[in-house]
Amino acid sequence: MTSTITICDTCKRDDWQAGTNVQTDGERLAEMVEAAAAGNPHVTTRRHSCLMGCARGCNVAIQGAGKLAYTLGEFVPSDEAAQAVVDYAALHAQSETGTVPYKQWPQPIKGHFVTRHPPLPDAS
Ligand code: FES
């Protein structure tokens, strides 16, 4: 079973400049996550415009059918962050419940968790 990473493609961090930045910070992170996820059999990616965590950009969500779902925020677009999100999502996919033991968390995602949501009763 795969887990899905949803990347907000409209996030703009506080230092984003409309005059000089061609892409939003979310678009930049989305490209990096998509590149890191390419060929990974455990994850899929998609983009969504605004996950309603705008003050905490950049934001991503990690979901899998019948599993705990998570939102993570305050990422700076970087290959390191993108790889950590993909690595965590792959562990999420391989977990029966969506719970990944803390000792397995990639270091760059620590401190970025914002919310978690239990699966719907009829989805498990
Ligand atoms: S613009 Fe990314 S959460 Fe709203």
Image (cartoon, grey):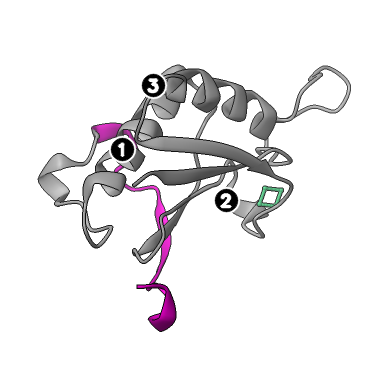
Local crowd size for mark 3, using a 10 Å CA cut-off: few (<14), some (14–19), many (≥20): some
Q: Secondary structure at mark 1?
A: helix
Residue 40 at x, y = what percent?
Answer: 37, 25
Front-most of 41 and 23?
A: 41
Q: Amino acid at mark 3?
A: Glu
Numbered disc in front, either 3 or 1: 1
Is residue 103 shown above or below 36?
below
Disc number at residue 121? Answer: none
Q: Secondary structure at mark 3?
A: helix
- What kind of residue is marked 1? Ala
Residue labelled 3 has its Cβ within 8 Å of some atom of ligand 1? no
Residue 120: give x, y in percent of width and height: 43, 78
Q: Which residue is most to the right?
A: 19
- From the viewer's perspective, is 79 left or right of 103? right
Image spot of residue 103 (x, y percent)? 11, 44
Disc 2 designates what residue? 56
Q: Nearer the viewer, mark 2 or mark 1?
A: 1
Left or right side of 91 for 51: right
Question: Image point 50% across, 48% down: which residue?
Answer: 73
Q: Residue at x 36, y 29 (%)?
A: 41
Magenta stretch holds residue 18: no
Q: Which residue is mark 1?
A: 90
Task: Determine whether label 2 and label 1 are within 8 Å by CB.
Answer: no
Under mark 2, the amino acid is Arg
Which mark is first along the chain, 1 or 2?
2
Q: Is mark 2 within 8 Å of ligand 1?
A: yes
Mark 2 / mark 3, whichever is N-terminal? 2
Q: Residue at x 49, y 43 (%)?
A: 5
Instruction: Answer with the quarter of the image where residue 23 lies.
Output: top right
Magenta residues span 107-124
Query: What residue do we see at 34% from left, 36% from top?
Result: 42
Which residue in the protein does label 3 denote?
80
